[in-house]
Amino acid sequence: MRIRLLLLLLMCGLMFSVKAQTYQPTAENLKARQEFRDKKFGIFLHWGLYAMLATGEWTMTNKNLNYKEYAKLAGGFFPSKFDAARWVSAIKASGAKYITFTTRHHEGFSMFDTQYSDYNIVDATPFKRDVLKELADECRKQGIGLHLYYSHIDWYREDAVWGRTGRGTGRPNPKGNWRSYYTFMNNQLTELLTHYGPIGAIWFDGVWDQDQNPGFDWELDEQYALIHRLQPSCLVANNHHLTPFPGEDIQIFERDLPGENKAGLSGQDISSLPLETCQTMNGMWGYKITDQNYKSAKDLIQYLVGAAVKDANLLLNIGPQPDGELPEVALQRLAEIGEWMKVYGETIYGTRGGCVGPHPWGGTTQKGNKLYVHILNLQDKALFLPLTGKKVKKAFYFVNGTPVKYEKNRVGYTLLLDKIPTDIDTVIALELE
Ligand code: GLC
């Protein structure tokens, strides 16, 4: 009897892993992946109760705040200045093509109307508005994509199994109740994918919380299948800092461009899936009142270009304030990036990493027979491009069409510039034969 049961379990396991390994994205999904790659630029919004504490989204665990005390923040959450229309127009004007919104971060508070927990913005706050609904409606109205961040961690729920974080929040049972928590997550995901219109991606985070417990099974296959069943073109993304698992449609990097690993979270191989790098505008994801250390517009634009030449999208983060407004400096940066994108967007959107790969001076993007050379940092008036086997028909400054002289040699082409480039990004357009 026991042996039969064991065999059955083994077979189920086998079937499951075969299914997972043979994940075949649908035609809609493959199309959505290409559209995602065309978009190149999105804005990440980290917003939750933590905005009120104004020290970032990890405060609950960093300060070991008791989960019942923390939950009382909800009673005072009234972001009176929240206006989805203003958020979306400011973001749209930056040239971003999608917004990724934190529906439920590690703190466990749902920023949308959910029937599976009262600990949500409609039932637990005096504000009583479904901000996600307002955001989703506005995104649709203004024609910008909506992606949803969803945490696998929950420092509030008693059924959430403890990982390496959130251990000091006073929850009574380290073992939790996986079945109950897993069902809860899938119920919420079903709400997210059925109540808010088309969702571009579900962006998971937190699998790394069990990295000291390698046998832990998050049962992702079934969760991913649920998402694809509900919305076949919804892309599954997971910020687990590993090479993608079967069932995932894009690969994420955190605080580093693909192939770089300065922040220490991006040592994983680069896959053939569409890529996205997320990065903060200042130094924190959630609102942090003392962090006015915003990256300059130049740095942000160069980062966006750096992502594009590496064939990746940039997901640039803003932490909205507790009153519901986006920080003033963030708004300024959005406007500055937008001005640049108005002029240079054509060399970014819809392109792919070009045939001359990333170099310390910059790199290239490509669309059809147009190669855009993005010069970010060059000390010379000449630039060598290892364009072997390619023929250049024409070269000009993208910004004004002025021709650029060039010389062909055995191993490529040398562009002869009229001065050492000093712009944020000097773009030379090449027409290839
Ligand atoms: C990390 C953090 C989280 C943040 C995320 C964004 O994984 O846990 O707070 O939301 O990165 O990439």
Image: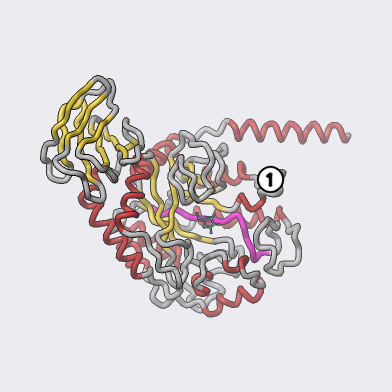
Q: Write the residue at 61% across / 33% down.
A: 19
**Figure quadrant of the N terminus:** top right
Classed neighbour count for the residue bearing mark 1: other residues with Cα under 10 Å, few (<14), some (14–19), many (≥20): few
**The residue tagged with tag 1: helix, strand or loop?**
loop
Residue 325 figure quarter: bottom left
Q: Position of residue 101 (x, y in %)?
A: 45, 59
Q: Write the residue at 63% across / 30% down.
A: 18
Q: Verify whether residue 156 appears in magenta.
A: yes
Residue 162 showing in the rendered view: yes
Q: In this view of the protein, which residue sits in the foreground, 136 or 294?
A: 294
Q: In this view of the protein, which residue sits in the foreground, 428 or 19?
A: 428
Q: How is the image coloured?
A: secondary structure
> Number of numbered discs present?
1
| Placement of 385 over or under 257, stated as above or below | above
Residue 351 shown left or right of residue 121 in the figure? left
| Placement of 322 over or under 383, stated as above or below | below
Q: Position of residue 102 (x, y in %)?
A: 49, 60
In the image, is the residue at mark 1 within 8 Å of ligand 1 by its beta carbon?
A: no
Q: Verify whether residue 62 appears in magenta.
A: no
Q: In this view of the protein, which residue sits in the foreground, 384 or 228?
A: 384
Mark 1: amino acid: Asp
Q: Write the residue at 71% across / 53% down.
A: 179
Residue 315 shown left or right of residue 305 in the figure? right
The residue at which mark 1 appears reads as 217
Q: Position of residue 5 (x, y in %)?
A: 82, 35
Q: Position of residue 210 (x, y in %)?
A: 67, 51
Task: Name, please, the residue furthest toward the left.
Answer: 402
Q: Write the residue at 32% across / 30% down.
A: 355
**What are the residue bounds of the magenta stretch?**
145-157
| Placement of 346 over or under 69, stated as above or below | above
Task: Name, please, the residue furthest toward the right.
Answer: 1
Task: Name, please, the residue furthest toward the front.
Answer: 379
